[in-house]
Image (spheres, coloured by chain):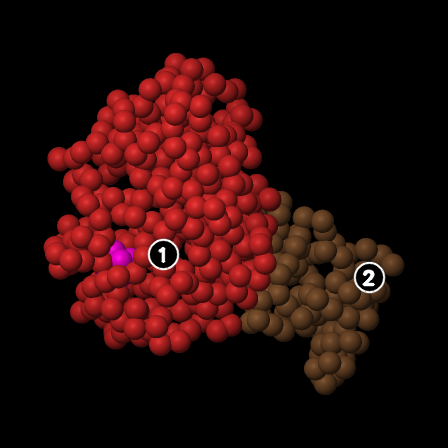
Amino acid sequence: MTGRTLAAPPATRRGPDAGVRSAYAFGLEFAAVPTTPAATVAPDAQRRRLSWTIVGRQELDADWESPSRTVLLERRHASGRLMLTIEQTERGYLVAAPGYGRHLIDPDGRAARSYLPAVPPWRWQRLLFAQVLPLAASLQGFHVAHSSAVELEGRAVGFVAPSGTGKTSVCAHLVGGGASFITDDALAIDTSIGATAIAHPGAGVISVHRSELRAMTKAARARLGSVVATPVDKILVEARPVSRSVPLERIYFLRRGATGRWRVTESAPPDPALLLGSSFIWYLRHPTYALARLEAADHLARSARIFLVDIPPSVPAVEAAARIAHHAGSG
Amino acid sequence: MQIENELDSETARLPDHVVYRAFAKETVVLNLQSGTYHGLNPTAGRMLEVLARSETVGEAADKLAAEYGRPRDEIATDLHEFCRDLLDRGLIQLEQR
């Protein structure tokens, strides 16, 4: 494992008044340690505030205790070792991953307190960006889709697919080819402003397969960003997300077929099941969030164009990206 | 037949915990108590819409028969079966008018 420091080692009680900069990710503006990989706040962003405080382990654990807990999500490694838990209590939401940190998010998503372990920053950033900020964004009313996204000609284009299908690879090759990076894996969408859905940039990190990085030219790799760390499974690259929200114009649902041919089909009119099924924060069962997902799907069905892309095994991600760029540019 | 006639005189209402949104080719009904989404094809979606806006199930059958140009008995049979399905899933309430 190699790596370099992206952010200063966390200290306790480092908050908005500790000389930190304002960062913007998933539609949320928050005070972050100086080099947290997220866009700097842009004046035109339709963002909401998150009060983020870093606290000590003991302080967080004291608040963590609760007589009533509901486990919303639990993921384990193949060995049975715990990977991630998300629990709900009367105080909010608890997000924990051994070795990656522990976070307590208020019920309305407007405040979060975090214990960040003394590990290379990319580790705690991974949990923060992959779960904590998307959950807070969802609690604040954004629709968070399981989607990567890029900006092409001033419009956001999202890529929805189950994990392992290639949405990050397609996104990475598009950025390498000149598109602007918006997000990897979780896309915060605001459907409350008007007839157009607004896509917010995510964190400034993209997690790419080694083989996909090798498939890029030197110039494309430089456009994508610089390597932060090389954990076992993927390579973490510090990318530069757009610094403002972008109108969401279309969403491609990617499907990897065992056989077949390349095919792009517009879902017109859009299939609501596709849109409902694309939610990243699906585990929030409260009626408020079930209704919010339905209303977001209703908005996206009217405001965005939805396409289904069948990608046969013979078409690598770099070629899929080129074909999609051509498709998106041809109307 | 007796039961069917009774249904015709009842009012079908969506409970407070049920909402729906009409998409172009599907209506999605959400049961907020269970968090379950139910998909209805356009015909069923239209039936739900007319049911929700009619004083009785019988009145809804009249409107739908006129709209689709089908015999009233045929439409009423389909509508009664649809009502029973919705009732089983807690998506409507029937009230005696």
Left-right relation of A259 to A67: left
Residue A2 drawn above or below residue B86: above
- Amino acid residing under circle 1: Ala
Rendered shade, chain B: brown
- Amino acid residing under circle 2: Glu
For numbered disc 2, what is the local secondary structure?
strand
**Residue lying farthest to the right in this orientation:** B97
Write the start and end of the magenta stretch as one range: A171-175
Residue A110 placed where, x, y %?
Answer: 52, 33
Main SS category, magenta section = helix
The lab-note entry on whether marks 1 and 2 share a chain reads no
Left-right relation of B84 to A247: right
Mark 2 closeness class: few <14, some 14–19, many ≥20 residues within 10 Å: some
- Badge nearest the viewer, 1 or 2: 1
Q: Which residue is mark 1?
A: A149
Q: Residue at x 33, y 69 (%)?
A: A309
Q: Which residue is mark 2?
A: B10
- Label 2 marks which chain's residue? B
The numbered dot on residue A302 is none
Q: Residue at x 44, y 23 (%)?
A: A17
